[in-house]
Amino acid sequence: MLARVESCGLIGLAGYGVTVEVDNTPGMPYLEIVGLADTAIKESKERVRAAIKNSGFTYPMSRIIITLAPADTKKEGPIYDLAMAVGVLAASGQLDLQGFESTIFIGELSLDGTIRGVNGILPMIIDAKQRSVKRAVLSETNADEAAYVKGIDILAVRSLNELIACIKGEKRINYRAPLEFEGRQTHEYDTDFKYIKGQDSAKRAVEIAVAGGHNIILIGPPGSGKTMLARAIPTIMPALSFNEALEVTKIHSVSGQLQGRSMVAERPFRSPHHSASTAALTGGGIKAQPGEVSLAHNGVLFLDELPEFKRETLEALRQPVEDGFVSVARVNAKVEYPARFMLVASMNPCPCGYYGDPSGKCRCTPGMIGRYLSRISGPLLNRIDLHIEVARPKYEELDDAVYGESSEAIRARVDQARKIQLNRYKNDGIYANSQLYGDLFNQYCKLDRESREIMRSAFQSMHLSARAFRRILMVARTIADLEGKENITTGHIAEAIQYRSLDRKYWGGK
Amino acid sequence: MAMSDHEKYWYWLASIRNIGVMRFFSVVQSGVPLDELFKHPEKIDCEKCHISPAIKKDLVSKANMDFIDSEIYELEKKGIRIVTMLSKEYPPALKEIFRPPLFLYVKGSLFKGMDRVLALVGTRRASRKGIVQIKNRARELAANGVVIVSGMARGIDSAAHRGALSANGVTVAVLGGGVDIVYPPENVELYDEIAEKGAVVSEYPPGSAPIANNFPVRNRIISGMARGVIVGEGAINSGAQNTVYHAYEENKDVFAVPAEDESQTTELPESLIDGGALIGKDARTILMHYGWIRENQQPEEEIPITGLDFFEKELYNLLLKSDMSVQQLVDGTNHKTNEINMTLTKLELKGLIERLPGNIFGKKTE
């Protein structure tokens, strides 16, 4: 007998339909799975056999061929166990699937028939719904994640037995109630800007960076609070919209990073160690998994100790930073994962770490400092708009019992500035000042005569490059937006100029 | 300024490795005139002159005028001249020290007025204030015809050279490596200027690396050339102290420059003053000590700063007193960071202040 059961596969972040066909004919006992199945799937036959037997059913002693269609895509992971088991039961006459059409079955089977959860449920369910599938059967563990998708019935079952009982009508079917996404972040971050003492200049710079979507680099000696500042950044980023949360959840789901959550409601903060491989960072590897840059999508990618990263790894970051996505090659397809994040880098000012520190501990020669800085690839530095110098706080600053401004207050200003940008650029296809290019500069960053004078003066006396010029303009635009001002004035430009430390003479700039 | 034959013989003998001052003079004073020995080097009595057979072998092989001439020619191609003790260019004060260099490799010229010579040395890790102080001192001294000698190291030495050059004066740099090796590398422009307007000298053959052992030996030349040694910022057990040691050995004057600020490294000057060194309070004091000062000296005028708004004046005055970080300015003025950053830029663009690593600002120094 032939049975047909529907399931789902994944290519990148998109689900697609996979049909599990089971053909059962008399003959020597033999089970073969075809359809470009990977090793986990080839092992399925043992799990399926044990699960069927241990659920009290008969495993057919005949010739069984299972094919996973379409036959030209690589199938990965144990997600088809459930569908295969159902198919084998149906093909051997032990189960009648009438009345259970337009249903997908997704789940891994334990040897005792328990159904286990799998990665990537969210994109699979989203795709199924788009294909007008009526119902999805999956593990209890995956149910909440799937419940965010409206318009498809979610049946969560614990075991093969329970499922069969539902199909036969012996057990009442209770579909999972749909979940609403909470628009505002309810996640409590464990840090807040108010806990950071002093560092007013750095906090101001970070506020500007988040408001305009600018990438930043924090430069300072060990113990100056660079990591603390970086970790606090997500607390002032605007709340995730539903679509943004969906994107983030899909990526985390596919990577198995949901960690029990059904939906990711806060902005990701990823900080890979500098020894991470290029594949770990940008994605790839055997299963073409999303990398850190994608896991940081819609959040922050923190590269601590930037000069310690391998040059080739930094080179690989160019595409995501520039384009907002990464292309990962697979055997027979090329997959694109989104990777639009705020880049926050940190570094010591010199090899010993204490250049510019009032303690005078630094013993590095100008040559050593220049060489250290040149390890950061030029193109990456080109995409960093603000250079923020962070100094070690003095004891008096730490002792102060007064808290600084809270993240909530800062976020309110950031939200305002973001709204202004969204409105301004609604017809231009960008959403933040950091994305300005070409002609849009002329349109939105007009300078009055005084401002142009300051720029010209700075350009000459500080020997700024054209690249620095544009970045100062972008940052000035954000500073003006934070004040709710339409026009950029000298004050905005003057402040923006201070955020280009690395272009300065004392660091080997001319 | 071609070398005389006699100078060439001198060079022939002195340029042998490991010959040393003692043995050199043994040979010179052995009774046989140098030109004779050059023509008949086999006549050198090893016993009497205390030289080894190996050295004699070297001497014999190099006792060839063509050979010597070609060596000198190669050096001249690189702009390097040989100044032996016989030359009028050789600093007179240097001849008097215990173990004078038998000859010097020179880029530039030592001729110009070598009577008013003062050495100026100090630490490589000088504070900003210290650098400004020494530069000014060197400038004023040079403006009164003093030749400034130093080692072209980072910090005080370079400040001294620059100060002298800014007054269109003469300065001499004595290097610890070959005269063609620019160390530290970032001083390449300073090196060129000194070679052009003064002299860069070294005892070591061109191409020699500036290894640590050379420096104490080189320091005797710095103090040796001068009438007195001025010490700027410095630490105990430093190169500067070593130069002072040589100065005391050779009976030179030692002036210590007192610090004006707590940011300066004053251990060495302080201990020197305790030990009886002269106080180099300002250039005038030092010049008066030697009677070198010109009668009509006009004090430098302070250029008044105009055109600053209220907030700019406030920040500028704070920075005049000492360098401050942006955080300190925020805490000290009750203004917000963005206003402060903005005003700092304006002051910077007006050339009044400069930005330093660590988010620190200070009054602009040249």
Image (spheres, grey):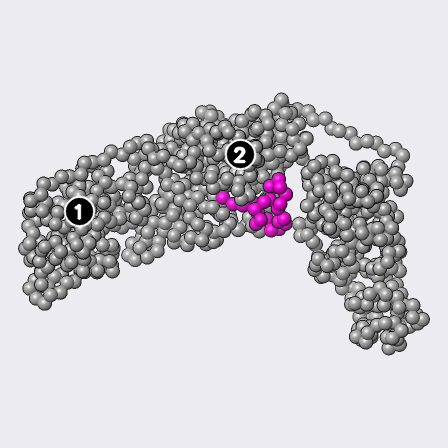
Nearer-the-camera pick, A374 or A79: A79
**Residue hosting label 1:** A158
Give the class, few, some or many, for how many residues have Cα within 10 Å of label 2's Cα (few <14, many ≥20): few
Query: SS for tag 1?
Result: loop
Q: Quadrant of the C terminus of chain B?
A: top right
Looking at the picture, how far across and down is residue A259, in whole percent?
30, 45
Does the magenta run of residues contain B189?
A: no
Amino acid type, mark 1: Arg
The range drawn in magenta is A346-369
Main secondary structure found in the magenta portion: loop
| B54 relative to B329, above or below | below
Q: Residue at left 25%, top 55%?
A: A76
> Which residue reaches farthest top?
B310
| B64 relative to A93, above or below | below
Amino acid type, mark 2: Leu
Does the magenta run of residues contain A360?
A: yes
Q: Is residue B160 left or right of residue A154?
A: right
**Residue hosting label 2:** A398
Nearer-the-camera pick, A503 or A82: A82
Query: SS for tag 2?
Result: helix
Nearer-the-camera pick, B72 or A325: A325
Give the class, few, some or many, for how many residues have Cα within 10 Å of label 1's Cα (few <14, many ≥20): some
Looking at the picture, how far across and down is residue B94, in whole percent?
86, 55
